[in-house]
Image (spheres, helix red, strand yellow):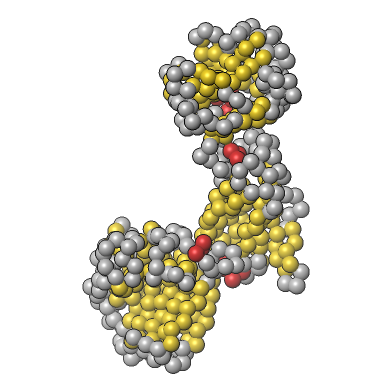
Amino acid sequence: MITGIEPFNVLPSSIVANDSFYSDSDLWKDPVINGTTFTRSAGWMVAAHDVGGGTGISYLQANQRFGTQMSFEVIMSLYAFDPASNNQISGIRLWVDDDNWFVLGAEINAGNQSAAMLRYKIAGAESVVHFPVNGADATRSNLDAYRRHFRIDVLNDHLVIYVNSVKRFDLKANAVPLLNYYFELIAGTTDDTKAFQAHFRDVVYRNHITTPEVYPAKIGGSITLSDTTPSELIFTDEISGNLYELVLRADLDEAYVQQAWMLDSPATYDDITSECNDLTTGMAVLLPAVPAANDAVILGASEKFDHVDVYMDGGVSNLDNEFNVLYWNGAAWAVLAVTDGTNGGVAGRTFYENGRISFAPPGDWTAISVNGVSCYYISIHVVTAGSSVPVATHIQLGLVSHSGFDHAAAFLSTLEVKMFKGFTGIGYTRSYMDAMSYRQCVGERNVEINGWRCDGDAKITFQLSETPTKPVVIPYYVFTRRL
């Protein structure tokens, strides 16, 4: 056991202690268990509470006491949690006595929900400070499973609080004797109906104050766009530091055809799946060289879809074939009522131009095996043959279960992503005058912003050019790194 830090030694000899939780350590006493267990697991100390496991605060206490000029830090995540929990807390605690203690970590309760907070009691009076981790608020929506770096520096007469290496709070603690206190990992709840896990790693304490090492702040969530009103992501210097680098990824949920056949009636199937999914000009030949009645384009997916997007630019238009659309109802191919945006205003002239074929998925629509591949299929079926052979550049399906940009946005609409920097007294101004533009149906990339250097507040906006038929949901992941 390390013995260089004695109870009342204000300036002990130089010591740095750490525990990566890969093996047993003599830094800790046996845990005190009140409903939540502590278990080492492959580089983590896992604090786990099961439904019905009991209530109270469990803690893992360091094997000695501490004085001033100390620094304590840990990486922690809410690995699993129920946002409807009540009175759940986890983090690091400095414990003097029942009336004087400090907890830095996360909590969920009826009044305060935060992935980063400081709850403390000085001379019997309890207070809490919530630190924004996503935009400018500190509400339930900020709860997430991302790792965060928490640090408390104990100086002569106050505590300095860091979250992800950014100074967030300076607490005067003159009334508290910052000597002879314990350092602990804690986790617990008074709600025995909810399970949760908090994971701790890389605990470090040292008896001298150093400049915090850079640790990226990780932020995640989703943006919902129901119309053409822009939605904003705001990044403040309070969260990321005065000068920081920002990286953002946003998933546009690229759509595709899982299976596509060109049927040369009565029973010759040509697999054109890769040609439909390609964006190379004029790749997907949709009918045989000599079209005939009952030839068809058969499109399918492993789940139900409600529209087909067809991009004909660079291909060959259908001029004289007449189509209808069929689906398998479990017993036979039946006519499917559709709104055909590809026919140029002439009923049955499917594949004449760019457009969306949309429909309400029938309740009796059933998967069927076509040429050995089982899917939910529609058959775009030749009723009266002409002489033209339509060729598409790209075809994709909009799955009912998906709400991403490529599935749910209006056909060939655009998503514009703009970047702004904030200036005191001025507000936000465009950082780059050219917006990043992403087009539905013909895009093969997600939103990526790499290494944007920000000095102060920053904002990124997302805006649709047209109102979608259902809300578009865009999940995103961001990390900012103090420079």
Give residue 148's position: percent from left, percent from top: 46, 65
Drawn side of residue 379 relative to residue 91, left or right: right
Left or right of 152: which side holds 23?
A: left
Q: Position of residue 106 (x, y in %)?
A: 43, 69
Q: Residue at 53% across / 40% down in the picture? A: 402
Which residue is at the far left? 30
The quadrant of the picture occupied by the C terminus is: bottom right
Residue located at (64% from left, 35% from top): 441
**In the depicted view, which residue is nearer to us: 442 or 83?**
83
Where residue 10 appears, as percent x and y from the top left, is: 38, 90
Give residue 102's quadrant in the image: bottom left
Residue 8 visible at all:
yes
Residue 157 relative to residue 41: left or right = right
Q: Is residue 256 visible?
A: no
Quarter of the figure that contains the N terminus: bottom left
Seen in the picture, residue 288 relative to 137 is either above or below; the reply is above
